Image (cartoon, helix red, strand yellow):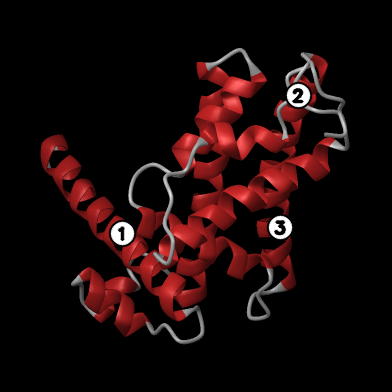
Amino acid sequence: MSPRKNEKIQEIRDTRQHDLKEAAIVLFGTKGYAATKISDITNKAEQSHGLFYHYFKSKEDLYVTVILELLTVLIDTVDQAEEKHNSPLKQLEWLTEATHSGSLRDGVHRHILIMQALYSDYLTQEVKEEIVEKYRFMVERIEHIIIKGQIAEEFIEGDAEELAVYHLSLVHGLLLTNARKISPIKVSAEKVLRQLKRHPEQGDDQ
């Protein structure tokens, strides 16, 4: 078989696997893990039920794969923020804007999926620990940016891990609020970071 034909076959396989993952993200995010069947995923991805097992051992295998990949993307996004800007404040501004860019629906599904996995009772303890560890690493990356910002006097003083959790909670909360479309707002990175930003005329506790 020629290299070109091999590449074409691999491209088709990659596309099919990607479609299954994307369908899973939407269904797991809207219906939940337990209520989602493999047939739901294959139907949405417009693929045969049998083909599913060419790429994943089980529904749980697909679920864990998607969760770990989503967390990897979030960590990579933090890396990009640090590469694009020297200022910790600018890094968090860029990261906040990147989080709210693109499809809002997709962002919500991804966020819900990660939160579900962190508190799931249907995954093995080993898998849950792996997911929690990866999420904790992402929090540590944000914490690292905040520490640098505190040294540069861009951010208020305080426990950096706690501030990182506050920041992530606000960003995710805004994402979910806008998804409900009750009172959608245009997310402003400047407003999101207002509670973290240090102002010379203010004390650190303000």
State the residue position of label 3: 132
Q: Could you tell me the amino acid type at mark 2? A: Arg
Q: In whole angstroms, how far apart are the C-alphas of marks 3 and 1?
A: 25 Å
Q: Could you say where residue 203 lies in the image, as x and y percent from the top left? A: 87, 25
Residue 198 is labelled as 2
- Does dot 1 land on a helix, a strand or a loop? helix
Q: What residue do we see at 73% from left, 47% from top?
A: 166
Task: Point out the image quarter for the C terminus.
Answer: top right
- Does dot 3 land on a helix, a strand or a loop? helix
Q: Nearer the viewer, mark 3 or mark 2?
A: 2
Residue 68 in sight in this render: no
Q: What residue do we see at 16% from left, 36% from top?
A: 3
Q: Nearer the viewer, mark 3 or mark 1?
A: 3
- Does dot 2 land on a helix, a strand or a loop? loop
Q: Nearer the viewer, mark 2 or mark 1?
A: 2
Residue 17 is labelled as 1
